Amino acid sequence: MQRRVLTVLVLGQLLAGAGLAAGVTVGALLAEDLLGGPGLSGLPSALFTGGSALAAVAVGKLSQARGRRPGLAAGFAFGALGAIGIVVATSIESLPLLFLSFVIYGSGTATNLQARYAGADLATPERRGRALSYVLLGTTAGAVAGPNLVGPTGAVAESLGLLPLAGPFLLAAVAYGGAALVISLLLRPDPLLEARRRETAAVGSATPSPSSITSSPGVTTAAVSGAAVPGPAFSGAAVPDITSSHAGADAPARIWTGDVITGVAVMALTQFVMVGLMTMTPVHMRAHDHAVTVVGLVISLHVAAMFLPAPLSGYLVDKFGTRLVAVSAGLVLLTSGVLAAVSPPQSTVLVTTALILLGLGWSLGLVAGTTVLTTSVPTSVRATVQGQADVAVALSGAAGGLLSGLVFAWIEFRGLGFALAALSLIVVAAVRPRRAAGAAGAPRVTAV
């Protein structure tokens, strides 16, 4: 069943990756052309990542109520609608419609990331990091091919009387629409609903009867349920008590433990750094006479570095824990920012290397944080919490995209690289050191 779920999710991600690449590759260039300067060229990135924040809440709530299938299918469908709106807006030169369409287009980005959670719903604890990483890996082919199709899709757009930079969004509309169909028709059984059914059955079989509790005073429900719960990886802190969450859905919830907050912080910070540097790289390269095709190739390699190493990131998480991988993510992002800052503008090789490291650091941080959210939150509230977490990630990306344009206009690309490199140190600082007490042995169980 898990293999089938992963197969369908990867197929959907193969299509959705091409939709994701459009905004990444030409969004800033399109804004620069329509707005007449680079100062607000980060605005499309801010808009579609801000839109992804709204979509993350909606997809999370719909998935929690109805399952992953309707949540993911609806998110991809709205992404396709947003891409169509962008094409129409460029043809009639309507900035309000363009900005609104970028917000709706962000639904595809949010759903593309939310799909990784579905890959981990039915995974065993020892393979959870790798399971979600396979879904991220599925994004690679479309996301890498997308930027390299800027030229061909631009030619198609011109033949239809549209701006060449609208071409990639024609591809995005088809890609997101195809992903919505794949998920809607093939994602059966629904992984979240099946995980919830299994968890309920496990709780029912593990909870002792009242008579057995009376005859064995030392046995408690929390102890029985806690024995089967995998521990989180950041600090050996609290693990939700599955029995308590099912026994009283309306009881006060203690979901946002230190581990969950740390996981979200790592993902949000890595997203800010990644979006900030990635968004301004095409503008920086075109300002120094790099061809659009070269820009597309550099972004392709960056996107490949975001998703292609995902299985490695998952393996490292399963093998060494999320704490070490999260710290590694911060250090890799630090190296990327410094290298981008010191690279000569004409050096395609060094800029490309910086962008590859940027993608790798993002992969490490995202897989580490996602694993914590899946491990530490019960299925009764998992999709909702994951959606809320992705809001923080999306808003962080929106801030990174918007501020990067302003910083670029103020202190240019070199200053932007150093600023983001300094921010990467916060990723390292955000990961709490493992406490001596409770770090070893059975995980401590906290009622939800």
Image: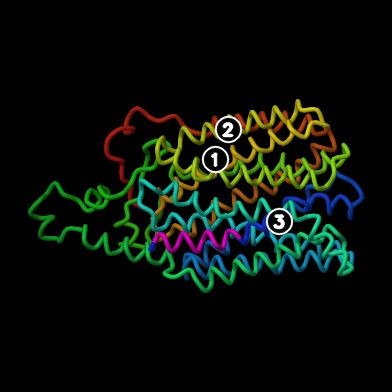
Of residues 157 and 237, the one nearer the viewer is: 157
Query: Against 17, is 409 above or below?
Result: above
- The residue tagged with tag 3: helix, strand or loop? helix
Whether residues under marks 3 and 1 lie with C-beta atoms below 8 angstroms apart, the answer is: no
Residue type pointed to by label 3: Phe
Q: Dot 1, how many residues are within 10 Å of its Cα: few (below 14), some (14-19), or many (20+)?
A: many
Location of residue 372 in the rendering, given as x and y in whole percent from the top left corner: 44, 45
Residue under label 1, please give it.
365
C-alpha span from label 1 to label 2: 8 Å
Q: Earlier in the sequence, mark 2 or mark 3?
A: 3
Whether residues under marks 1 and 2 lie with C-beta atoms below 8 angstroms apart, the answer is: yes
Q: Which of marks 1 and 2 is nearer the N terminus?
A: 2
Residue type pointed to by label 1: Gly
Query: Against 415, is 77 above or below?
Result: below
Q: Give the range drawn in magenta.
A: 2-14
Q: Residue 330 carries which label?
A: 2
Residue under label 3, please give it.
48
Of residues 265 and 36, the one nearer the viewer is: 36
At x 47%, y 71%, the residue is 66
